[in-house]
Amino acid sequence: MPDESEIESKTPRNSESRHTDFLPGHSDHLPILFRAVECARNGIVITDPLRVDNPIIYANPAFSQLTGYATEQIIGRNCRFLQRDDREQVAVKEVREAISKEMPITTILRNYKRNGTLFWNELTISPVRDERGRVINFVGVQNDVTARIDSERRVQEFYSVISHELRTPLSSIHGALTAVEDGTAGRVNAQVMRLVKIAVDNSTRLMRLINDILDWKKLESGKFKLNLAFFDPANAINSVINELQANSESKGVELVPQIMPHHDIYADEDRIIQVLNNLTANAIKFSPPNSRVLITLEAPARDTVRFSVSDKGPGIPSEQMDKLFVRFQQLDSSDTRKKGGSGLGLAISKAIVELHGGNIGVSSVVGEGSSFWFEIFG
């Protein structure tokens, strides 16, 4: 734990002194507490702010194992020795300020082992007060989170690659293929058009997957923001039907809107459309030919609007229900496997609905179909 002073007392102490120094008074519980701290897997140190430079007066074996320093190389020193010459960290300044104000703090800072290896230390510091409220010690609990930090960095790099190295060129490819498909780029023969349509469908699918992954990243990081405004929810249903009409017709599935009496809602229209689009696309995917998908809008209460998407697909077994709305989860049936999908759509839909303060769910009967619904309040 860093301190403003740069004085470092390096007076070594043996293991016996480290034991007795930190045990004030006598209590039947002290031996148990001491053994617990000694056996803890987290590195634990205790410092004495009443001495010059707030030195370490106790370090448990896990702290020695974590840092590579022997006990006699730790006792009597200020914790700043773990930062070496890397002391201009924001986290270090925060720790100094917390200690000066006698406040607890949890932060992550760069530390260095005895052999010079960098490790990320998740440090929690707590002041210890006597019966008069005076701070007599600080307890520091250390946790090596290097693996977690490295993993988060690799994940961030992965998202960066998806966002910049995949989405941008894919958008260009999709735009070019669409220009050929709609005739903007000139006429092509039927065989070429068939191949172009396949390419357009698959590039659309891939773009949807990339957008789902990036949306989930925003949701996890808390950066997914809603653009709230009043709008007629019937417009969302019409938008989804217009977008998915060609897909449903190619599969022999009819999209049927059922617009009941309702009222405007205060929500993010684009995100409501995204949820409806996902539920409707899934319904089309699992519907048999020559069947209908019902998209219903109703107002079960004055402050509630309910959307539902119902199909005549194979239905969902009750033992599979807990896999719905969970990221990267798909049902285990062979029929579901053949349909494909990222396993993110329902999880994202659930997160979007809950960001609105709403509810989402499903009712299903095997062999008869499923009905996915969600409600927006207000």
Image (cartoon, helix red, strand yellow):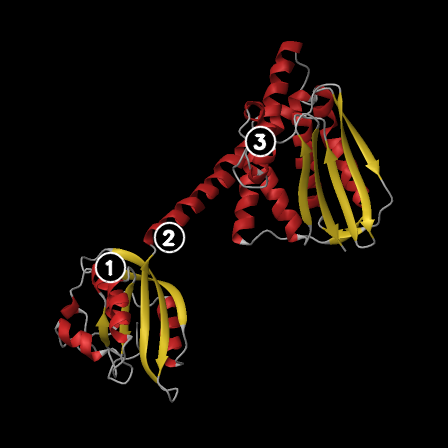
Residue 77: give x, y in percent of width and height. 21, 74
Query: Which disc, if any, is residue 329?
Result: none
Mark 3, residue position: 172
Residue 92: give x, y in percent of width and height. 35, 69
Of pointers 1 and 2, the one earlier in the residue sequence: 1
Residue at horizontal 40 percent and vertical 81 percent from the top? 101
- Residue 85 visible to the viewer: no
Figure check: 148 above or below 100? above
Query: Which disc, if any, is residue 149?
Result: 2
Residue 109: give x, y in percent of width and height. 34, 63
Residue at horizontal 66 percent and vertical 48 percent from the top? 353
- Residue 369 visible to the viewer: yes
Count of numbered tags: 3
**Mark pair 1, 2: CA separation:** 17 Å
Residue 62: give x, y in percent of width and height. 24, 61
Of pointers 3 and 1, the one earlier in the residue sequence: 1
Mark 1, residue position: 66
Name which quarter of the figure residue 291 lies in.
top right
Local crowd size for mark 1, using a 10 Å CA cut-off: few (<14), some (14–19), many (≥20): some
Q: Which quadrant does the N terminus fall into? A: bottom left
